[in-house]
Amino acid sequence: MSEPSKRSSADDVKAKFKEALDRKRAQSKSGAAHQDGVAKAQGAHGAVAARREFRRKSG
């Protein structure tokens, strides 16, 4: 007789967790994704005027 009560309590727990997960997923979908936005820093570094030249120490 205790077996059906264990099943119902386990089902209740599963149902509560499923409802909580559904609420969490619904809440995350409502926010902005920021995927179609543009990055703020565009062209942060300018083009290099000339290639750097490294010289050996002569003295």
Image: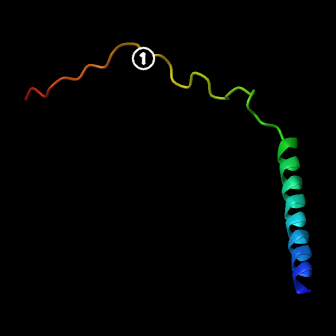
The colour mode here is rainbow
Relative image position of residue 26 (x, y in whole percent): 88, 48
> Among all residues in the image, which is located at the extreme front?
1
In the image, taking residue 42 as reference, residue 26 lies left or right, namely right
Query: Residue 18: x, y in percent?
Result: 86, 59
Residue at point 73% right, 31% down? Answer: 35
What is the count of numbered marks?
1
Q: Residue at x 85, y 64 (%)?
A: 17
Q: What element carries label 1?
A: loop
Image quadrant in which you'd find residue 33: top right
Q: Is residue 48 above or below residue 7?
A: above
Which quadrant of the figure contains the N terminus?
bottom right
Q: Place residue 24 in its image quadrant.
A: bottom right
Q: Quadrant of the C terminus?
A: top left
- Left or right: where 5 falls relative to 39: right
Q: Nearer the viewer, residue 23 or 7?
A: 7
Which residue occupies 87% across, 53% down?
22
Residue with the mark numbered 1: 48
Position of residue 3 relative to residue 18, above or below, is: below
Other residues around mark 1 within 10 Å, as few (<14) / some (14–19) / many (≥20)? few
- Residue 11 lies, in percent from the top left, at 88, 69
The residue furthest left is 59
Question: Which residue appears at 82% of the width and 47% of the height?
Answer: 28
Residue type for callout 1:
Val
Q: Nearer the viewer, residue 32 or 21?
A: 21
Spot the residue most to the top. 50
Comparing 34 with 45, the one in front is 34
